[in-house]
Image (cartoon, rainbow, N blue to C red):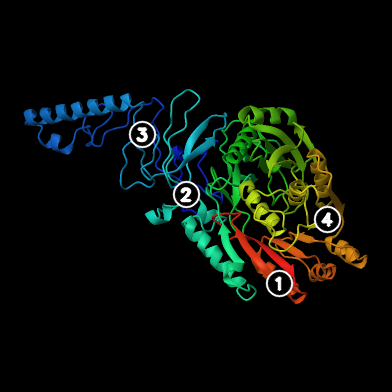
Amino acid sequence: MNEKKHPHTPSARGPEGGARTNANGRRSAGAANRNAGTGSRPARRRGANAKGRPAGGAHGGTRSHQRTKGRPTHGDAQLREARAIARKLNAQLEGDGGPRKKSHGGKKGAAHDGRGGNRNGGRTAERATGNGRTQARDAHGTGRGPAKARANGSTRPNSASSGAPRRAASAQAGPCAIARQCGACSCIDVPYGDQLAEKQRRVEELFADLAPSPRTIEPIAGMEDPFGYRDKIASPFAPGRVLPARAHGKRRGRDEGERRAILCGMYTAGTHRIVEAPRCPVEHPAGRRVIEAVRQIMAAHGIEPYDEDAGTGFIRHVVVRVGHESGEVLVTVVTNDRAFPNAKNFARELVRRCPEVTTVVQNVNTRATNAILGDEEHAIYGPGFILDALCGLSFRISSHSFYQVNAVQTEVLYRIALDMAGLGGEGDRAGSAPAHLLDAYCGTGTIGLVAAASAPGLQVTGVEKVASAVRDARQNAAHNGIENAEFVCEDATAYLRRRAAEGQALDVLMMDPPRSGSTPEFLDAACALAPARIVYISCNPETQVRDVRRLARGGYRLCRLRAVDMFPHTDHIETVALLVRQ
């Protein structure tokens, strides 16, 4: 949603000193308090000038006073009263830490209450200034938040709401200020229980003709706390509005008058237009802190953001990985050039601002592509990876690692899948305990390793065609001391066909294909291999139901199906299905 354009006012300036802009780079205004917290001249009371006299006519007196010039008793009493009120008001304002400006109904924007709040109820978030200080700013006008302390210990009131038209209170009730512009969390304003009920209904409707009984489709597994669950946060960087000539800090490769603000946040749905995201209710809070710190460092040291239209600039993206259990933080800075001047100093400054950061990696991507990461990278601080715990095992996570972004629900998903495979705590519902499990599309081998650790007598084989993922899987196996798991770098369909041709037995096939689902060739090879059961993990129930129908024609019956809410507040549904050979 494009924001309404308003005239520029000095009080609505952003971090670098110019007018705040929306995602299109247009100026947006708000009625900010120019004097509050600065120690400048007190704001005038309505109807009074700076000396406390009533404002008005050519000679400074009010019209009534001019008309009653011949009756000084009445005029003097009125003047004395006005002066007394003005003195009292100024004394109150100075006692609150600075004067404040009254709101006038005819002016655009929101008035401030002088205590760091916003009468529009603007949610606040930290914004960087050019000299590294921070100030609280409004983020599209929902919620209320206190002003952040400045470096000198004083506070500055929030800037006014952005130039977007005021919305009805019901539209502002959700926990995200930019939900409409971002579009990623399409259900953020829907009560979480209603979200789960709708997802359950969709799954039941999709699989109705394949479920032999109503109990086949089990209740969806939701989250106890459906916020702050994303442990991977990515933000693009791009140039914003042109900064005024007086802004400090030269930017590499640009003339003095061509310097621009730095935009970062999220792409608006279906576009490459960036909407700024000071906070996100579904992301780990450390992620946005790191991204904002990167923007501050870029502004302070003149590092240019990437301009995808011109192919110029330096920093394209920043990707943050947070270890759910370990708390370690991996920061990947994606650059448009191999040369990274003062890279070590950049990393040290980032760690100083965000002590939770344990490693910083430079990833080089010089291609004109929508892909975030390039192939070349190296660590500029720390080991280049983080460690995190999942289902009792320790996993090494690098920038390229296939690793779920919601660790809490990943453990729920894995417990359900292993139970369906006959390795869970609820007992085997499909026969004796398996001896050999094949994990197709295994990625870095997380679920296969969890299965191997849970049953020492089980032999696990993981198959994945991406060499770097297989390398990570083998390292994770060695790191955890697991010897009953092996990993093969090969196309899963070719591997299944070869194994079926050789007549090798298989107890359980566990598969987790991409959103597009599996291929007919893979499914036919799976039926030819004839495992006793197939555990199908899917991130797209629409393609899963298509594949389950093909497996049903090959002799398998759907016995259990359960949805897992991996991404609350979105339309996304993850499902796990157990198919048993008839």
Label 1–label 4 contact, CB within 8 A: no
State the separation of the CA atoms marked 1 and 2. 43 Å
Q: Which mark is residue 114?
A: 3
Q: Nearer the viewer, mark 1 or mark 4?
A: 1
Return the x and y of residue 245 as percentages of the image width and height. Answer: 57, 35
In the image, what residue occupies the spot 41% across and 27% down? 38
Tell me: 64 left or right of 262: left
Which comes before the other along the chain, label 2 or label 4?
A: 2
Q: Which element carries disc 4, helix, strand or loop?
A: strand
State the separation of the CA atoms marked 1 and 3. 67 Å
Tell me: 106 left or right of 371: left
Which residue type carries mark 4?
Val
Quadrant of residue 259 within the rendered picture:
top right
Return the x and y of residue 309 as percentages of the image width and height. Answer: 69, 52
Which comes before the other along the chain, label 1 or label 4?
A: 4
Q: Residues within 10 Å of mark 3 (few under 14, many from 20)?
A: many
State the separation of the CA atoms marked 2 and 4. 41 Å
Return the x and y of residue 188 as percentages of the image width and height. Answer: 50, 55
Q: Quadrant of the C terminus?
A: bottom right
Label 2–label 3 contact, CB within 8 A: no
Q: Which mark is residue 463?
A: 4
Identify whether 69 is placed above or below 494: above
Q: Which element carries disc 2, helix, strand or loop?
A: loop
Which comes before the other along the chain, label 4 or label 3?
A: 3
Which comes before the other along the chain, label 2 or label 3?
A: 3
Which residue type carries mark 1?
Arg
Q: Nearer the viewer, mark 1 or mark 2?
A: 1
Which residue type carries mark 2?
Pro
Q: Which mark is residue 557?
A: 1
In the image, what residue occupies the spot 39% across and 42% down? 31
Q: Nearer the viewer, mark 2 or mark 3?
A: 2
Q: Which residue is mark 2?
A: 175
